[in-house]
Amino acid sequence: MTYPHTRRDDTVDILHGTPVPDPYRWLEDADNPEVQEWVAAQRDFTEAQLQHLPARGWFTELMGRIVARPRAGVPLKRGGRWFVSRNDGTSAQDLWYTAPTLEELVGGGEVVLDPNTWSDDGTSSLSTFTVARDGSLMAYARSDGGSDWQHIRTRDLRTGEDLDGEVTAKFSGPAWLPDNSSFLYTTFDEADDARGTATAGLGVARLMIHRPCGDDELLLTFPDEPHTMASGEVSHDDNWLVVSIFRGTENVNRLWVYPITTAHGRSTLGEPVKLLDTADAEYTFIRTDGGHLYLHTDLDAPLGRVIRLNLAGGELTEVVPESDATLSAVEAAGDGMLLAYLDDAQHRVEYRNLDGSDPRPVDLPAGALVALDSSPLRDEAFVGLSTIATPTASFHVPLPVAEAAPATEEPGRPKGPHP
């Protein structure tokens, strides 16, 4: 067996006075043609060895039968339209379907995104998508070759056609502004190389506003803090942009809010209100209501609690205190909140009024919580559960939840056998 040749060079680093040879440093440059030739040779060599394994055909057929199972995600309502991911078991990646009503979606709907068609070798995938509030446009992010870099394009949902142009983003999903034509995204230096596989610094992050005319605007950056990034979310009443500012992967963040004004088809942002300008805990935005910001936080509560913050003065009030179980997620739901707890390795979900009162459990079967989708603008929610033996099942939860109201399994799963 003759392995492909790997060149060594005389690269040496002096670390604390000690020479440390690094003869393969040249392999870190993924854009180097020599490195690309080396990768291709390694791939060809590996395939040549694997194809002679006597059990390979049997193993491939067995895994194909195990993996090729029909599955569906949890229905999502975005921009007045319904969306769901489905796979009949034969596609490498899930397809996304859409319909104007839930009934039509359950009946089939139409394909809106099919990542299987984006590349010949199947290495392009869907990272995320968001829909403008009026349902006219979708911004979807494509990732190539497993890279963290995202190429965001805009699709007109009325015609099914993509608009001209795309933006390059990283570590963020597009967040639509109320004008239904502009969205926020986070980017770094130009992504015209293979840095999506690198672990080195990416330079300074920039929170940008993408405008339909192509003249993108810089909203926020921290040139003296190269590891600091920001992402934004628009409140359901379209009055505030809530920006979370965090450093690398630390589980603490700052929180700023920008007032939004929309006139003549264009949303503009006022000066930020730096509500929480010290990264002393993790703060996750839930919703706004009556001049207050509702947040899920671990501030003075390692297992999580819900607090309310006055948008004018920053006064903090506890809404749902910390309990003995871990508060893993909180979603605004109708006029209240859905709270998901992890209690003795088992998820449980309850509904509360916005002031934290009157907790009502949602009666669900055992399983791991994989999706919790709701909105202040809807009187229903969807919960996704799965187990080690079953794929994701969707449950429809009418709001407000009555006492111990059982959820109803949503039938919008693909036809065919289920394990």
Image (tube, helix red, strand yellow):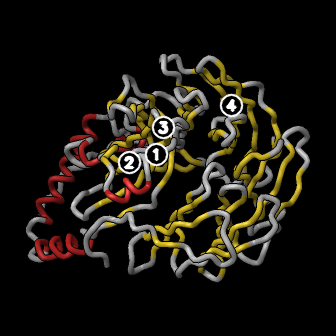
Q: Is residue 144 left or right of residue 306?
A: left
Residue 91 in the image: state x and y as whole percent: 24, 57
Label 1: few (<14), some (14–19) or many (≥20) C-alpha neighbours in 10 Å: some
Drawn side of residue 3 relative to residue 10, left or right: left
Q: Nearer the viewer, mark 4 or mark 2?
A: 2
Where 151 sits versus 264, above or below? below
- Above-or-below relation of 336 to 134: below
**Which residue is label 3 attached to?**
135
Q: Which residue is mark 1?
A: 81
Front residue of 243 and 155: 155
> Which residue is label 4 attached to?
222
Q: Position of residue 15 (x, y in %)?
A: 57, 47
The CA span between labels 2 and 1 is 7 Å
Dot 4 or dot 2, earlier in sequence:
2
The quarter of the rendered structure image containing the N terminus is bottom left
Q: Is residue 419 above or below residue 256?
A: below
Q: Secondary structure at mark 2?
A: strand
Inter-mark Cα distance, 3 to 4: 33 Å
Question: Which residue corresponds to the image point at 67% horizontal and 29% vertical from the top-left?
Answer: 220
At horizontal 81% and vertical 41% (from top left) the residue drawn is: 277
Q: Amino acid at mark 3?
A: Gly
